[in-house]
Image (cartoon, coloured by chain):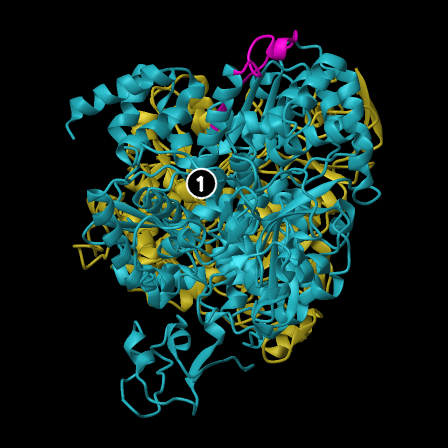
Amino acid sequence: MCQITINGETVNVAKTSTILQAARQLGITIPTLCYLEGLEPFTSCMLCVVKEQKSGKLLPSCSARVQEGMIIETDSDEVQAARRDALELLLSEHIGDCEAPCQKGCPAHMNIPQMLRQIAAGELDKAILTIKKDIALPAVLGRICPAPCEKVCNRAKIDEPVSICLLKRYAADANLDSSVSYIPASLPLTGKRVAIIGSGPTGLAAAFHLLQYGHACDLYDQNEGAGGTLRYGVDPDKCPASVLDSEIAVIAKLGARFILQKTIGKDIAFAELRGNYDAVVLATGVIDDSLAALTGVPFIAGKGFAADAKTFVTGVAGVFAGGSAVRESRMAIRSVAQGKTIAYSIHLYLQKKDIAPLAGRFNSSIGKLTIDDLQAMLKLVNTGSRKSPADTDTDCLTAAEAVYEASRCLRCDCRKPEGCKLRQYSEEYNADQKHYPNINRKNVELIDQHNTVIYEPGKCIKCGICVQITERSAEKLGLTFIGRGFNVRIGIPFNSELAAGLSRVAEECVLNCPTGALAHKKGEEKQ
Amino acid sequence: MSQELLLYDIDTLVESIGKGPDAVIPILQAIQNKYRYLPQAALQRVCEITDITPAAITGVASFYSQFRHQPVGEHTIHVCIGTACHVKGAELVYESFQRFLKTDPITDTDPSRKFTLQKVACLGCCTLAPVVQIDTVTYGHVQPEGIPGIIQDFSKFVRKTATKGLKRNTNHVRREGEIRIGLGSCCIAGGSGQVQEALLQTLSEQNIHINVKRVGCVGMCHQTPLVEIALPGKKPVVYNKVQPGDILAIIHNHFRPRGIYSITGSLNRFMDSLIADRTDTEIKKYPLDMRDQPVAGFLGPQVHIATENYGIIDPLDLDEYRRHGGFTALEKCLLHSTPDEVIATIKNSGLRGRGGAGFPTGMKWDLVKVQHNPDKYIICNGDEGDPGAFMDRMLLESYPYRIIEGMIIGAYAVGAHTGYLYIRAEYPLAVRRINQALDNCRQAGILGNNLLNSSFSLTLQVKEGAGAFVCGEESALIASMEGKRGMPRIRPPFPSEQGLWGKPTLVNNTETFALVSWIFRHGAENFAKLGTLRSKGTKVFALAGKINRGGLIEVPMGITIREIVENIGGGIAGGKTFKAVQIGGPSGGCVPAELADIGIDYEALTGVGAMMGSGGLLVMDENDCMVDIARYFLSFTQDQSCGKCTFCRIGTRRMLDILERLCAGQGTEQDIINLEYLAEKTRQGSLCGLGKSAPNPILTTLKYFRHEYEEHLDGYCRAKKCKALITYQVNDNCNGCTRCAQNCPVNAITLIPYQKHSIDTSVCIRCDTCRQVCPVNAVEVHSCAR
């Protein structure tokens, strides 16, 4: 036995243990990428470094053995910096986008590629879940959205972008037309009540999400019908009122109360509302200075309420403001997105938590794709050109058209966005992918000659876990390291196909690959 | 080649080597020897009939640079890009070959499939830099404009050797005395092979019968080829820079001709221009008296221990080695000392490992000795991969018995009964000589069971490395011997506990073993008298670069860098200014001329950011760019990194990216900050010595020459070395001779006889040819800050 100290705690472990094993015995977690229990430690990623204080050395804990009297620190600033350095180096050669450009370009951050795959697979019931997670009014937006997502779609660099907006509309319409339209599940009622002033896109979206959190919502509007600009500022040929009504009905079913033809300041005093509710949302749309002044909430003359750009908190506690009430926007999707964010801020506020913006996840980014990259991606998808609806009267896609169009998606997003440990740790250690620019990056490469598995060498961190798994299971060919130095890669012996290399342990390799390098072809599904 | 024939060949070849997983490297080497590359069908066959898996063979075959996966041309042109060649323009030479032969960028082979172009890390002929080797023929001091001539000469050589064999006269009366000819690799590179051939031929034609004796390296590589005529009663006479055409004249100097011969003096001018040092205006050959000033300077400060009896003994003559005291140290140890006493002597001598890190040798031996395992191994690390060092090669070639003796003593001390000499496959002569020496020892009862009639038994054999710098690291070397990719693993456990096949293993550097027998013959205290407080004895260096006299030197520890450069090296060549020395190759650092008064000592070198390293000692002058030097070493280490740990694999690449940007004039201040940071992090975070020391060239050049990095940000390269930052211009000296225009490979100069020429900088590729061919120094290189 041998005694060592880790983060001030003393532990007795067998002489043959590694520092990692000793730390685990103490319940101390150390991040690892290349280490997998049961395999020989390969000592490659260097994420598991810890510092031995006596020698002042950084040691890879997965394979460094304990020595009597070692004093180890696993979480000091220096250790964290070293881990971040390792991550930033790994990221500098990581050829992959965690999220697709369309999702990043969508103000509501909707998981568009997942929706497209669900539509392509005919799984419309799943598609509506994906959509409604972020977008309260997809049928309306499917008709009026200027589709910023399509402007950044990588497919546009080959021919034309995927018809994302129409496909969203297709899925939303199909759901509204079905016998049971989707009503998201709500958390138990919290007893908290929120007043929303204005039932335009911001207010409706805020209500849609607040209700799911279990907070009751009353929407006040000066007009006869709810919907604000969606009802009164949109060409009815483009978006008939009936579509809006159907989506408002869903929000009403969630429990929203609409108090119409009431003007704040005239019919109800703002102070009274503040007294009656736990929180108030100012979603009035464009508001003139005199009305704004009545609320007592600070505003910028000629512009609207002053609110934090990320949390939509105003100068008055419990009062939030968004949409055109803060800054005029003609893009309803932006208002809908802000409604969602406001709901999240209020949810935090009502739980008396610090109000912080909904943290975006870490995103690896390839940057600009080259023609070669795009061609590689195109090989796996529908190469046909963009399909417009044959029915030009309704401008609706048919089921066949939708499947065709959705399968044009290049699948720019990662197949393992959640399971990827590289992403998880990059987030945790706040790694910056651009710290070490990769000037001559390699091309996107997709190796897919396999029934279920796809291999992307550009995402591989060369940890060799798959090599060891195939070796252990005596795969006939297996996987191996090829080459040396910076250009080392994992490959299949004798230039064989992936299926020949991974015949028995494909699942095990996908499961244990720490990144999206080895993934299921269909990818992860997330909700 | 028919498929069946190939399979049959593979089967027989495997039969003779073995079928275990550790046979993979020898099998691959045998296949490549046969087919000149590795046909995939052959590898698949190997997997069918052995225990070697497809994954293992693919991994190993692609790890080592020796192995080729594409068919190659009839002849291979090895362009040495070692350190010394680099500072003398090897890149320009390589590019010129590419242009001249129009090689394909992927196969590196010319359209007629006659020549394949290949860069090699070091041919070990640093004093002849830049060096190119075509098959077995070596050309030194190669310049871009000489390339057509080299190809032409080589083609002639091929035709000649195809028709002519070497004549020997067997019916003779021997004369007393001997003619000694240096036949180390560098001598051979300098042309001593041709000289030997001419010598034998001339002697046979002249009917002169005298013993022609090959001797190992004399160390004076700057004077090769060397021929020494030793006749009884006469002072030996040494001729330097001898050419085949000189032989007749030399022979006539010493032996009365038995007939009338005309000495035409028709030296092979063409060969001269290729091989001889171009800085000499006229090639002079004269008897070289050892007492002459330059040579006294070269040899004077040296102390020969590892290189004892240099230039005198025939490397493979066992009797001669014994006449000079060979194997008496071994006898003393075996018959009169216990292993503990042997180790005590080594400890008392203060000997430290000569592989670079300087671990005390006696302590290392002790660590292996105390292991209880009955199976132990001893390994001589001869995987010298530093691109500017050739000490181990020279020792293995010239003093095989001395190394074997050192190994046997070590094996006896630690209790190992099996041992290996791991030698780079790039050193074929060393492999041949060691193998022959081992055979001779076995026959003489110096190896094998109960050697020298003692109770001690030891078998030794050679394992050939396959070209991976990282295999100099002991855990990687062991992995390689076990038939794996040469990837280091974490230490501890050290090889002394768990080495080859998991058994206790002693790994020492070649030079370390070469010092052992002297210590026993002369006493530990005499060894310890040499050197400094903590670094004892001598160190062998490969001295090269911008000095007047380069070569293999052995100096006492503690000698100053300045003494080496000025006395031994004869100062900087061409009247330029001494700028820095690079010690220890890719793991070492640049020591500026201001610090040249420090003595050679492990700690002193580490103190200035350098490292004893393997012993490369490259001298640089004002025309060497320190950013370029850092870039050069990083391009080497990032290529040689095994690719295992993140910091080394990606860190070295990112540092190289930054250095490339700086050399291209595209760097930013942030780049320098990032470079320094990453260098420090790679030093701390890498798994093995390669990664830990790879940043040294950057850290030292940043420390001592930061201003040069900063100047590159402004587009200024003071050494006028970085291509993107320089322009070529013709000045008024131009007499319109048109040579520049005729030689320009890209037609950047319009040919206008008798008028001043000018260079179109937009077309110019900065190959330096025009400047070199200009007879009137009319071509100038400029670099100016933006």
Answer whether residue A306 is magenta in the image.
Answer: no
Chain A colour is yellow
Residue at disc 1, secondary structure = loop
Q: Badge 1, how many Cα within 10 Å: few under 14, some, many 20+? A: some
Residue drawn at point x = 64 percent, y = 65 percent: B571
Residue drawn at x 58%, y 59% is: B549
What residue range appears in magenta? B444-463
User: Residue B126 location in percent, x, y?
Assistant: 51, 53
Q: Residue at x 33, y 18 (%)?
A: B14
Question: Which quarter shows the N terminus of chain B?
Answer: top left
Q: Is residue B528 left or right of residue A212?
A: right
B603 or B187, nearer to the observer: B187
Residue B460: within the magenta? yes
Read off the residue under disc 1: A488
Nearest to the observer: residue A23 or residue B22: B22
Question: In terms of secondary structure, what is the magenta stretch mainly?
Answer: loop
Q: Position of residue B374 (x, y in %)?
A: 65, 8
Which chain hosts label 1? Answer: A
- Residue beneath the point at 49% across and 47% down: B229
Q: Chain B appears in which tint? A: cyan
- Residue A458 seen: yes
Name the residue nearer the viewer: B466 or A82. B466
